[in-house]
Image (cartoon, rainbow, N blue to C red):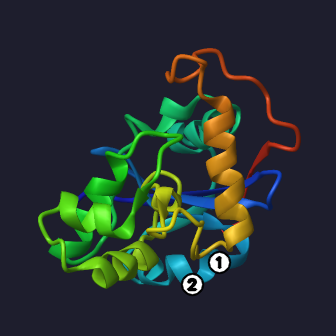
Amino acid sequence: MTSTTVRTTSIETPTGAVRIAVAVDDAGERVVALAFADHFDRVSARVRARFAAAEWVAGETAASDAVRRYLGGELAAFDEVEVDATGTPFQQQVWDALRAIPAGETRSYGQVAAAIGSPGAVRAVGTANGANPVWLVVPCHRVVRSDGSVGGYGGGPERKAWLLDHERSTKGANGTDVTSPSPVAGVKVSPDRP
């Protein structure tokens, strides 16, 4: 059996610190929790139970570097990041659909429900969004109300609006990601204390 270590890092952003937990073993790295620091304990509770036997240590990973690159303007930084989020088959289906929403774009809860073949499951899509333990990488912030308003977000509507503005303002004039990231004031990465 492979020994697993969970590395945690805090990353300061203009809207508050985010914390990331990454499981590392012989199979590689997988993000298991990512949320704003003031919500991390709630989001990571199931993850801590699941990885109770793992050693939790502070440390950088490729995934924490991807968070820094995303915040610095490289919107495609999460494309190759592996996720290991435990959820129901329906939640997994919703989370896969969220990862397919391009940075800088939004979908309504109804559009996500239709995209997964369950057009009547709008509220269930909202519930799956709320259960997402890997914010940013599984971009639940890209799902908005049918009227286009921001709606709810576990980290708060102000942070959701900031993330959407960050993505929209970072998009190139032709709709593609900016390839050379520009630094974002206030973004600082530091290893976390477990």
Q: CA distance from mark 1 to mark 2?
A: 6 Å
- Quarter where residue 74 is shown: top right
Q: Nearer the viewer, residue 88 or 108?
A: 108
Identity of the residue drawn at 60% across and 20% down: 172
Label 2: few (<14), some or many (≥20) within 10 Å?
Answer: few
Left or right of 81 on screen, residue 73: right
Q: Disc 1 on helix, strand or loop?
A: helix
Q: Disc 2 on helix, strand or loop?
A: helix
> Which residue carries the number 1 mark?
39
Label 1: few (<14), some or many (≥20) within 10 Å?
Answer: some
Numbered badge on residue 42? 2
Left or right of 106 on screen, residue 118: left
Q: Nearer the viewer, residue 135 or 152?
A: 152
Give the residue furthest to the front: 147
Identity of the residue drawn at 59% across and 28% down: 171
- Quarter where residue 167 is shown: top right
